Each structure stands twice: as structure tokens, then as C-alpha cells.
Amino acid sequence: QHIYIVMVESEPPYSPPSTDIEGVYSNLEDANNAVRRLANDFVDPEGCENGTKYDGTIYWAAEDVGNGESARVFVKLWEVRGPGSEKPCDWEN
């Protein structure tokens, strides 16, 4: 089983880059729709690029979303570990 995590990466010109989780989805269609919605929220971005990766997830990126800041919106696919995937253990510290 997988979950789809929608992330926004931003890189301001004079600050460290940041990555934020914008949502967690149980299906690909909703995650891809969230990427489109978040990308559409940027006003007058420059140098835009979008596409579909081999796993069906989509991405969007812009060289400048204002004040020289670049941004990327994408889906990260994570495997969900089922019950019993971790052996019980006690605290050691």
C-alpha cells in the first residue's frame, strides 16, 4: 500500500531552501489535483515546467515565483508499512 505526499520546495535567493508537506492522499488522482491547485496559486510565475514521472505522479516547477524565489511542487510516493512490520522492543535509554 502507498500514500501520496504533496510537497512544496522553495528556494529564496538569500535564505536556506525549505520543503513543506502540503497534504497526504490515499490516491494518485487527488494528489495530482493538489499539485495543480497549488501550482495555480502562484501569481505570474516565470520559467515554468511541468510533467509526469514514470510512476504517474506529476510535478510543476518555476524558476521565479516572485523576488527571485524558485519553487517546485511534486508528489512523493511512500510505502505504508502494515501492522507488525516493526518488532516490539523496550526503551534502552
Image (cartoon, rainbow, N blue to C red):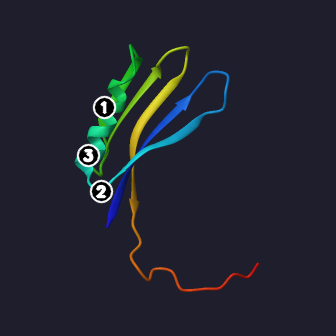
Q: Is residue 30 left or right of residue 64?
A: left
Q: Residue at x 26, y 48 (%)?
A: 56
Q: Kindly check if marks 3 and 2 are in contact, taking CB atoms under 8 A apart as contact.
A: yes
Q: Position of residue 27 (x, y in %)?
A: 26, 54
Q: Earlier in the sequence, mark 1 or mark 3?
A: 3
Callout 1, which amino acid? Arg
User: In this rendering, is residue 73 above or below 55?
Assistant: above
Q: Is residue 40 left or right of residue 11?
A: left
Give the numbered dot on residue 1: none
Q: Position of residue 54 (x, y in %)?
A: 30, 49
Callout 3, which amino acid? Asp
**Dot 1 alpha-carbon crowd within 10 angstroms: few under 14, some 14 to 19, many 20 or more:** few
Q: Residue at x 61, y 33 (%)?
A: 17
**Dot 2 alpha-carbon crowd within 10 angstroms: few under 14, some 14 to 19, many 20 or more:** few
Which residue is identified by label 1?
37
How far apart are the alpha carbons under marks 3 and 2? 8 Å
